[in-house]
Amino acid sequence: MSAPRDAIVIGAGVNGLVAAACLAKAGRKVQVLERSETTGGQSRLLEFAPGFRADPLDRDAGWLPPPVARELGLTGLERVIPRATVAVPAGEGEWLVLSSDAARTAQAIRPHSARDAGKWGVFCGRIAALSGFLEALYTLPPPDIDTTAPGELLSLLGVLRKLRGLGRADMIELLRTVPMSVAELLDDWFELDPLKAAIGASGVTEIRQGPRSGGTAFVLLHHHVGAAPGALRGRGYWRAGPNALTRAAETAARGLGVEIRAGADVARVLVKDDRVTGVALAGGEEIAAATVLSSADPARTLLGLVDPVWLDPEFLLALRNIKYRGSAAKVLYALDALPDFPGLPLAGEAFAGTVTLSTSLEELERAADAAKYGRVSETPFVEIELPTLRWPALAPEGKHVLVAHAQWAPYALREGPWNPARREALGDAVTAAIARVAPCFGERVRQRAVLAPPDLEARYGLTEGAVTQGEMTLDQILFMRPVAGASRYAMPLEGLFLCGAGTHPGTGIPGGPGWLAARRVLSGRRHGARP
């Protein structure tokens, strides 16, 4: 057995690296084990054609909680908010382009709907206030609603005070909005279909539900945590590159003495007398540690690495009932030149943000219907980005990369497993969707790669290809993430902790789960870890 460490962290993505750095800063001897030959986790760049690279999973920079950045000194990270955040077709040869500036967006909306333009500023303020409450909540451990400990009761009261701090009107609006469908929310505010589609798309990002499903208004709020007021769909990107945050976290971890070992595939978590004693690698090597943190998802960690004899049957059942339901595919295009989108004003600005191709919530709902029956949508919901306008080095000089995010394409298909023909059919459907607004698109494509959910599972270690590590639905957030009774990072096996996006506060909050998990380890308490 290799020399013992105080703690082992499984996975060298941003959450694993942040957790390791926090523990090392507190004086712990920490080793990070990464199964891939390179670090980076979900932000690893993929070369899908000679000279063409992409980061297919990260839709935006997310929200890095300020306490994480301060504690680890994550410097040199400059976030860029594109002037045009999202563009959507708005009729024959017309486009609606939303801006990071609320007044500019209202001006763009006015020719289509003076009524909606007049409401835009108020709506932006309301979304900022409601998502701001989540922002405050996301720097705290999930509330323990069963606690009787005085310290934990004070923490719970702190959450309630933050809720009261919204004021009566916004507090009522939050409680009303969270369980709503995003379609209901937007129908209350606006009449313009393309506007509702452009905003509502963020309510169904990476989940297997359409915009008329309850709780999707919460998903919209979640994806706007950390966004500047008025910058709908505009959390931006890192100027230094798509993996800038992970590189900064790795530099911080190494500077604090963390040992990072790539190509180290953890096969088992070792247990003796109901307590973790270390891990065993796929090659048979064993490494001793009293504490193991895993940034892998709950299923891969607890159902894949831990012998079930050590876990209670009811807990195992709860784990097996977590919804992953990966339904998003990625189609990567190597382009010889920028595509031409007729009628799109200031195309260079729009391409620096997101271009969404569904023009109504009804289109989104119809596209989602197919997934309910285990089928790939014949007319998928597609959003595209051109990362080479942000980072030109991702492609040879003068060439470009286009990333298309396509929903809905379920992990499990009713007609049988994914095969090359089904991948090509999906790629053709996505290409056709782009060509409807960019007729010459096909002529610019040098090569494409289709990544269906099983491909994401194999390449990135994501159960069912779910970037979320468990859908961000109302039954899988806060004290129910990953499961009720084990939401506070400590698992019902002494010494084992989860620190990935499968825990609170979830996906899109890079570093947040890792930081909160490390604080739980250092606190020495095991609340929420019930056998």
Image (cartoon, rainbow, N blue to C red):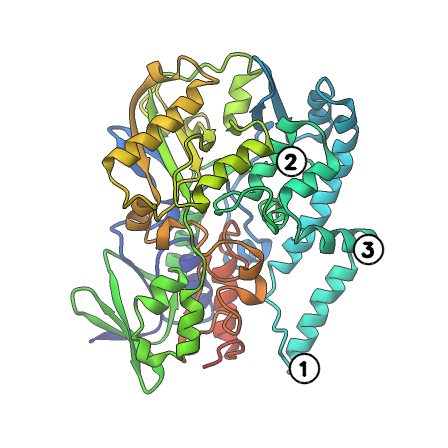
Q: Residue at x 51, y 49 (%)?
A: 508
Q: Quadrant of the C terminus?
A: bottom left
Q: Amino acid at mark 1?
A: Pro
Name the residue carrying label 3: 167
Residue at image point 57% right, 27% down: 359
Residue 56 seen:
no
- Is residue 403 depicted above or below 57 in this figure? above
Residue ID at (40%, 47%):
247
Residue for badge 1: 150
How far apart are the alpha carbons under marks 1 and 2? 40 Å
Q: Whole-Å distance between the Cαs marked 3 and 1?
A: 26 Å
Q: Which residue is mark 2?
A: 231
- Of tags 3 and 1, which is closer to the observer? 3
Image location of residue 72, percent across then percent down: 50, 57
Q: Is residue 485 left or right of residue 20?
A: right
Secondary-structure class at tag 1? helix
Q: Which residue occupies 39% across, 38% down?
A: 376
Q: Earlier in the sequence, mark 1 or mark 2?
A: 1
Q: Three-letter amino acid code at disc 3? A: Gly
Determine the residue located farthest toward the right in the rendered image: 168
Is tag 3's residue or tag 1's residue first in the polypeptide sequence? Answer: 1
Examine the rendered structure and indicate whether residue 1 appears above or below residue 223: below
Secondary element at tag 3: loop
Tag 2 or tag 3, which sits nearer the N-term?
A: 3
- Please indicate, yes or no, whether residue 25 appears anywhere in the rendered image: yes
